[in-house]
Image (spheres, rainbow, N blue to C red):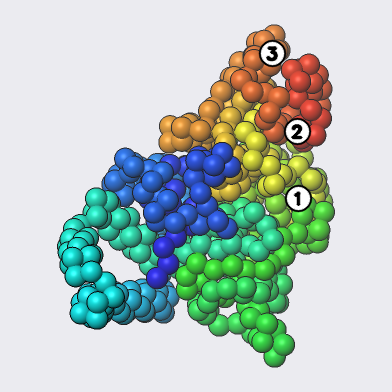
Amino acid sequence: MSGAIPLCRLAKIVGQPRTDLQRMVQSGELAASDGQVEFAEVLRAFPEARFADETEIARVEGIKEIALGKRGRDRERLPDPAILSRRLDALGQDFARLEAALRHQTQVHGWLGDRLGALAEEGRLPPETAREIRSWLARELAETPEDSERWQRLVARERTMRLFSAQVRVQSKDIAFEAQGNETLLEAGLRAGLSFAYGCSNGGCGECKARLVSGEVVKLRPHDYRLTEGEVARSVTLMCCYAPLGDMVIEAALPGADEIPEQIIEARVRAVEALGARVVALHLLTPRSDRLQFLAGQRLRLRIGEATGEVSIASCPCEERRIELHLVRGGALAVLAEGLRANECVEIAGPFGGFVLDDASARPLLFVAEGVGYAPIKGLLQHALSRDRAASIALHWFGGAEGLYQEALPRSYAAALDEFRYVPVSNPAAEASAAALATLAGVPGLSQTEVYAAGSPGFLASLRALLASAGLSQAQYHEEPTAG
């Protein structure tokens, strides 16, 4: 029976962000091995934890789900009957092993008493010493350990959570994600913001193959792609069709921004939405068999009729087939987009650009957006929250001529997350924006942050100079110029 808890699960049990736990591990406050913490170490490091009160955790998770627009997906939190049955079976086997070990230890204790008596009779041990040891052993076995109740609550919580989720660790990477309920490996990885290679996502192409290093999977949906005998022998699986039965380790490709092949896809219009007076959002849906593979922050080329142009993607891969684009009114694409109706088709191609998060960095994140530059920043922000690696996240949004829109999202994050800060600047006047921009130089620990900025070329030039004077290194600054 395992006596260790993955960090992602422990964060929910003790009610602390995973980033806090990671900092504790790095500082030596919390002992962990391969992302796992022993039960005894949990009790030592969190003496005040109750291990039973989920009220605050549920409140925060609820606000985050509302902000991300993911309500109505409760079915994904309920494991498939095959998964639940196998996980229950695994817990039953754990319990049986524990019962067998406890039975054996009880027998050993009895044998030890008998052996002490025999040694005393043989004159090899003083009778008084034998009685003293037997009496001490009886007292210790009868006494309830001081932390027994907390241990039981901790184990009960962890075992219950194991029924509904599994941690998946990517070998050779400092990356782990959680598969919840009825999610496949691919769905869970994309939700966590990972750039797994995939194509059709329904078992037809084989692009999402991964090798199981440890752990088991169960098939959730049929697939046409046939693995070779060699792949089966090496425990290769299709991430889009299989779900983890429990905590596991996999070996899978995570392509970078320059490694994702260009795709040309015919997407359907879900909706056209006005975002304030100057911005329109075009919501698209890609086919089930032909999703767009991209990283948060990248661009795509949009074609509507004869008009084409590159547009930043305002959604993240965790939104699955849904693509959101923000267009400035008055431009050719925006004019044509406003005339589109639901289910009409447009062509998208991509992805393009390298304005993506550095997943290897755990520095505090500072996002700076001007006007419609909020579009790529929004995708990066969602990706950063999905990854849950940054010590803190701040968003400074300068409205510019386009003003501020979709503010419910960052305001919801600020209300739910202690480590998130939102600073809106709605006045588009140049002098007001310049004064507000200057306040960035006073952000605590600015030189230690990773900065991602998107906006007009002039705005970015001013920002670059300001951050350089504040001591931020060029390697920690990333920008995406926007038009309009």
Q: Is residue 369 visible?
A: no
Marks 3/1: CA–CA distance: 32 Å
Can residue 213 be seen in this snapshot? yes
The span from disc 3 to disc 2 (Cα, nearest Å) is 19 Å
Please state the horizontal and vertical placement of residue 318, each as a whole percent of the image: 58, 54
Q: Residues within 10 Å of mark 2 (few under 14, many from 20)?
A: some
Q: Nearer the viewer, residue 85 or 200?
A: 85
Q: Are marks 1 and 2 in contact (CB under 8 Å)?
A: no
| Relative vertical location of residue 26 with respect to residue 192 in this rendering, above or below | above
Mark 1, residues whose alpha carbon is within 10 Å: few (<14), some, or many (≥20)? Answer: many
Q: Nearer the viewer, residue 300 or 107?
A: 107
Q: Earlier in the sequence, mark 3 or mark 2?
A: 3
Label 2 SS: helix
Quarter the N terminus occupies: bottom left
Q: At which x and y percent is residue 252? A: 68, 67
Is 48 rendered above or below residue 457?
A: below
Mark number for residue 300? 1
Q: Which of label 1 and label 2 is nearer to you?
A: 2
Q: Amino acid at mark 2?
A: Gln
Q: Amino acid at mark 1?
A: Leu
Q: Which mark is residue 438?
A: 3
Residue at point 58%, 42% (across, down): 26
**Relative to 227, 44 lies left or right:** left
Q: Amino acid at mark 3?
A: Ala
Q: Which label is found at residue 476?
A: 2
Q: Image check: 411 left or right of 231?
A: left
